[in-house]
Amino acid sequence: MNTRERILDAAAAVMREQGVAQATTKQIARAAGYSEALLYKHFRDKEEILLHVLRERMPAFPGGAVAGAETVEANLVAVTDSALRFYLHAFPMMASMVAQPRLMAATRETLTGYGAGPRHPVDMLADYLTAEQNLGRVSAGSSPAAAAALLMGACFQQAFLCYFGGGSDFPESAAVDLVRGLLPALLP
């Protein structure tokens, strides 16, 4: 395992245990077995480390649904399953960050600079649904943006409830159940 990989593994562990707000680059470097100076040779700041941890050490976030491939239901179930797992694993890291306005503002600015952030998955899903709508596989009268917001919001809420309840995973039917609740409003 190379230096960068060890730093990201250590950062993921420290951020899960301490939360993003409490995790320091010094703690991350110590957990990785390196100096803090070496950490800065690979990453600009803690927010860049956070971004890479979210991208590389978390369950894959939804994306990749291809309009016209598979069924709309199958694509939405795959996206929903990924979103549920991502949000569940992200909660321990993100909760402390959200509670600190200054850190939240800095993280918002940094993630925006990287073209990332919580709006991104909703927009990606809305784009996918719009493409399916253009193919006639999603009802012309439905709102892809509203459906995407509803589905990602439901994933976020279910992940929070699972995390809050001390759970570590979802029932196998969780993604299917969420999608099937939305399908009547989407399918022609």
Image (cartoon, rainbow, N blue to C red):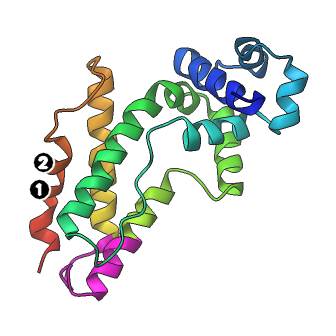
Within-10-Å neighbours for mark 2: few <14, some 14–19, many 20+: few
Please, what secondary structure does the residue beneath circle 1 have?
helix
Q: Is residue 32 magenta?
A: no
Residue 177's mark? 2
* Residue 51 sits above or below residue 116 on the image: above
Count of numbered circles in the view: 2
Query: What span is in magenta?
Result: 127-144
Label disc, if present, on residue 78 of the rendered structure: none
On the question of residue 21 being in view, the answer is: no
Q: Looking at the picture, does residue 60 appear above or below residue 119?
A: above
Question: Can you name the residue that lies furthest to the front here?
Answer: 1
Res 16 visible: yes
Residue located 21% across and 87% down the image: 136
Q: How far across and how far down the image is residue 185, in percent?
A: 13, 70
Q: Nearer the viewer, residue 165 or 82?
A: 82
Determine which quarter of the picture holds residue 106: top right
Which image quadrant: the C terminus? bottom left
Residue ID at (23%, 69%): 70
Q: What residue type is labelled 1?
A: Gly
**In the figure, residue 35 lies in which quadrant?**
top right
Q: Does residue 70 lie above or below 13 as drawn?
A: below
In the picture, measured across the screen, residue 93 lies left or right of residue 84, that is right
| Residue drawn where x is 59% and y is 22% of the image | 15
Question: In the figure, residue 62 lies in which quadrant?
Answer: bottom left
Q: Closer to the observer: label 2 or label 1?
A: 2
Q: In this view, does 130 lie to the left or right of 171?
A: right
Determine whether label 2 and label 1 are within 8 Å by CB: yes
Q: What element carries label 2?
A: helix
| Residue matched to label 1 | 181
Instruction: Describe residue 109's horizontal placement relative to residue 171 as left or right.
Output: right
